[in-house]
Amino acid sequence: MPQTLQVRVKPAEAADDLFLKKLISQQKGVPISNIQGFTILKKSIDARGRNTWVNLTLQAYINEPLGKRQLRTFSFEEVSQSTRQVIIIGTGPAGLFAALRLIEGGIKPILLERGKDVRARRRDLAAINREGIVNPDSNYCFGEGGAGTYSDGKLFTRSQKRGDVRRILELFVRFGTDESVLYESHPHIGTNKLPQVITQMRETILRAGGEIHFEQCINELKISGGKLTAVCTKQGDSFSGDAYILATGHSARDIFELLHRNQLTIEAKPFALGVRVEHPQLLIDRTQYHCETRDPFLPPAACNWVEQVNGKGVFSFCMCPGGIIAPAATAPGELVVNGWSPSKRNNPFANSGIVVSVELNDIKTMKNQRDPLSLMQFQQQVEQTAFKAGGGNLQAPAQRLVDFCENRTSTVLPSCSYLPGITSVNLKEVLPQFIHERLQLGFKQVAQKMKSYYTNEAVLVATESRTSSPVRIPRDNEKLHHPQLSTLYPCGEGAGYAGGILSAAMDGERIAIAILQQWGLTTTLPLSVPLM
């Protein structure tokens, strides 16, 4: 029977199988020749001290053949003749994983995606980066795979009670992700690899008899007798099903407006807004690993922090080591930035969102503060201000970090990974006052703990504003459908119940299971989901 042990080793030792076998031999008191091999169950990096260590949990095979990692099997059988079908609006993680779970339950999913498939979507991303042209239906947020496809591919969540994390990770491996996501403490796929994974998911859904319709944007709801009975698209098509999963992501403002026009209950939801800060990766490595040059056996370092400033959180968000800042606007005349990294995280810069929480009492100056769309409209206004400040064509307003904190306009800006380009602007002209002041104080507080982080080698790029949905779509606590429509199931990040790829995927599965349970097809439901 395999034996489990924990070891603490140097980075180079962690990459040396023979060295690890010797450690196993010493701990277990057996000759090294008796050790047939091992698998890694957990791996994490501890850089808190002057020396950096790698913590490993190993499963050793002693006097028995090396076994394969234990992974569950998934069955996606033919569902084209199913007597029931579910319309899924959106093909982000929530929509895709809901579809896969429905297929496992014998139900046919029909997915509607306003954007294009991952291959065609690339041309629209190129147009954004090179020409500043934003296609409102196909961009970094909209299209097959959702915002997650071109947003780094982090598979990490602190919300362990949302569902079966391990199952989601194993599904990613089933569709081509490296097995390291199963044991890394902060698993990451990489933007360059995610499109292939999403493609494999799509092909599995289609082979099983599901349907996927691209370039179908919902613009009308058919409601009768407390039920959603059909959805219509601006392309002139109508789709009907036995249930409807709304998984449109955090940026689908037209969907929030559509629900509001139909007098369906939605709520303003706090979100976070700020800037994206970019440092040379070398500087972050030195700060985190306490050395001049990063050990080649260590990954590019990440840097995360949180500070309390005048009773409100200022915190880092979506750190992308070796990454790139990308234009994430979903409509012309807006300036939004996000970050991503390739699988090797080998770009020369590290970037991270630095944001401040925004609540209803922060926007008292807005005319319709009680409107459920008020925080969304506030978010949009800031993005439009940033666009104008940048001079158009998606040039982003930017300022060196120390200059920002000292209220100086930067005379010269450093190199930056943001492809449309940056232009020097005092970000006091872009950001709301309460955001600007708290960011200044937050950076200054962090400077007391990480002096090398506080440098004019770093540049702030505005605005990081799509951290989460500014709207929540309520749902019944038990059956998970909308309180007014028994066939409409709000889902994922856009509905306010997830915050990233992994939690969105789990919420998609949870909704699918709730529907199957309503139809008497399963009795298993994941643990309860706390509100975001």
Image (cartoon, rainbow, N blue to C red):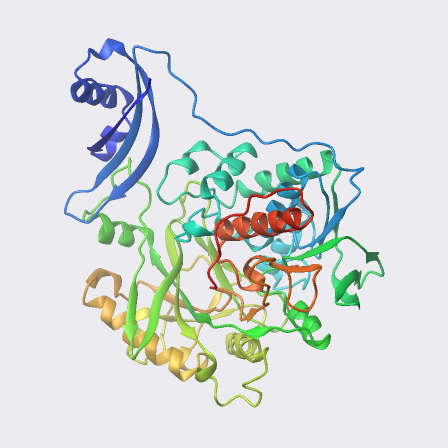
Dividing the picture into quadrants, the one containing residue 249 is bottom right
Relative horizontal placement of residue 492, taking residue 448 as reference (left or right): right
> Farthest left residue?
50
Question: Could you tell me which residue is drawn at 74 percent across and 41 percent down?
Answer: 210
Image location of residue 530, percent across then percent down = 46, 60
Relative horizontal placement of residue 131, taking residue 161 as reference (left or right): right
Image location of residue 378, percent across then percent down = 53, 79
Total count of labels: 0
Q: Is residue 144 visible?
A: no
Between 188 and 336, the one nearer to me in the picture: 188
Image location of residue 466, percent across then percent down = 51, 66
Image location of residue 351, percent across then percent down = 39, 57
Q: Is residue 396 visible?
A: yes
Relative horizontal placement of residue 375, taking residue 99 as reference (left or right): left
Is 456 placed above or below 193 here?
Answer: below
Dividing the picture into quadrants, the one containing residue 233 is bottom right
Between 403 and 119, the one nearer to me in the picture: 119
Question: Could you tell me which residue is drawn at 48 percent across and 88 percent down?
Answer: 364
Dividing the picture into quadrants, the one containing residue 272 is bottom left
Question: Could you tell me which residue is drawn at 30 percent across and 28 percent down?
Answer: 58
Quadrant of the drawing holding the N terminus: top left
